[in-house]
Image (spheres, rainbow, N blue to C red):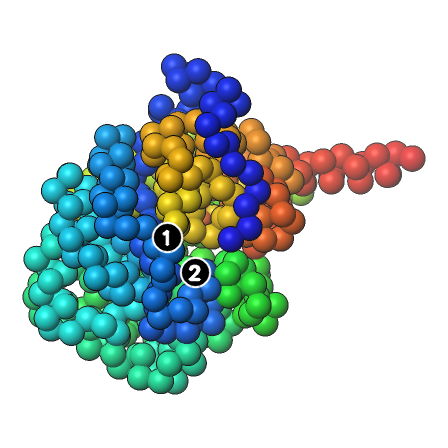
Amino acid sequence: MTTLESNGHHSTHTSPSHTNPGTQNKPRLIFWELTKGCNLRCIHCRASATELSSPSDLSTETAKAIIDQIAEVSSPILVLSGGEPLFRSDIFELARYGTSKGLRVALATNGTLVTKQVAQKIVDSGVKRVAISLDGVDAQTHDTFRGIPGAFDAAITGFRNLKDLGMSVQINTTIARHNAHQLPQVLELAKSIGADALHTFLLVPVGCGVDIASEQMVPPEEYERMLNWFYDQSLTGGIELKATCAPHYFRVVRQRRALEHRSATAAAQAAQPVLVAPADAPHIGPTDMTMPGSTGIELKAQGIGKAVGHPGAHPSDMNAMTKGCLAGTAVCFISNQGEVYPCGYLPALAGDLKKQPFADIWENSVVFNQLRDVNNLKGKCGCCEFRNVCMGCRARAFAATGNYLDEEPFCVYEPRSESLKVYDNSLAEVAR
Ligand code: SF4
Ligand code: SF4
């Protein structure tokens, strides 16, 4: 994984703790790539998993010590992932240990190794929710993406084995060009097999994703249509549905809700000539910036992991003061070697658990503290009226320009302030 910078022990780069944003932000969702080992060969895998075993993985004792350190800071949802986490022989011991420390442990797996016996062990280890990846509505689509014939059927069997024991199971789907058209069918499949949730995630060009990005990334306009479809679906209910790591969905929701709830007065105002804002992008004032209650990114007070499975997904127990991308603010990622990143898709090294305690990294990391201040955002995200609730995907910004503070490249919205600048410029042109 490429690294940008590390704060090491250099807490001198940061504010004193009484003003340090790190003390105001508690980790609520931690993704832990416990191993790079995996039995599948997914073409988009962020872990670039190529080995069946992964000798550089942390030892059981080191992993337990890290759990202790996390528990000292807060009681987040801890998502054990990989690679394939079931490749670790101590996976159930670690899940049990995390649970005993008060963490809410979830497991993100490809599902193919979940026999009836394994399902029982998962339940017994205290795991609260399992996320299984399905990247297509049929075996052909899924198996092609996952690189192994039979992976789809095995994942469905694993799903059923868990559901038979009453486990809460969600489906995670990575969206790319090859399966974007199947999204409605994937939703129907998730509902029909009794999934507790469907979380979708747009491919981020890191890891193996870099190689397929040019042919598999969904264009921004289609992404926008997809997010609007999500909004429509969120109104119909029937299943918990999330557009994971789609920060501008928070913008779409506000735009759609403003359109739907516009009062007669507001409608009259909207009928006034709008100089530059697109017709489908009404200006939303701060009073509209409340968390919607019935959107795909519904945030509830209790329950595990209405948000597990994708690095950087958004926990369901967030309060209303949340935003689209929570990388470094409430979410972080731990690699199989103990390196800490804002999320699994953003290779900006925040610290190393082999050298520093978790609390030091969480509170003093330069990277994390940069991400906690929206004033650091550049480009159109930097001047966008939605930046406090959206923030854009920092990983996609990094993939596009090498600067994770740059603008999100997969958002079609032109911020009003930026539009006004354009308008001012065109007025200046006319005046010349
Ligand atoms: S940077 Fe934020 S939105 Fe992007 S993948 Fe990471 S957590 Fe998700
Ligand atoms: S411009 Fe950036 S902050 Fe504004 S809606 Fe798009 S991604 Fe979000």
30 left or right of 162 in image: right
For the C terminus, which image quadrant? Answer: top right
281 and 359: which is toward the camera: 359
Asked if the beta carbon under badge 1 is closer than 8 A to the nearest atom of ligand 1, the reply is no
Q: Secondary structure at mark 1?
A: loop
Location of mark 2 (residue): 47
Residue 117 screen position, x and y as percent: 10, 71
Location of mark 1 (residue): 336
Residue 40 position by quadrant: bottom left
For the residues labelled 2 and 1, say whether their Cβ atoms are less than 8 Å apart.
Answer: yes
Question: What amino acid type is highlighted by mark number 2?
Answer: Ala
Q: Is residue 176 above or below residue 401?
A: below
Find the distance from the CA under tag 2 to the CA under tag 1: 10 Å
Residue 420 screen position, x and y as percent: 68, 36
Question: What amino acid type is highlighted by mark number 1?
Answer: Asn
Q: Is residue 166 visible?
A: yes
2 or 1: mark nearer the eye: 1
Instruction: State how many labels appear.
Output: 2
- Residue at position x 52%, y 43% from top? 348
- Residue at position x 19%, y 51% from top? 94
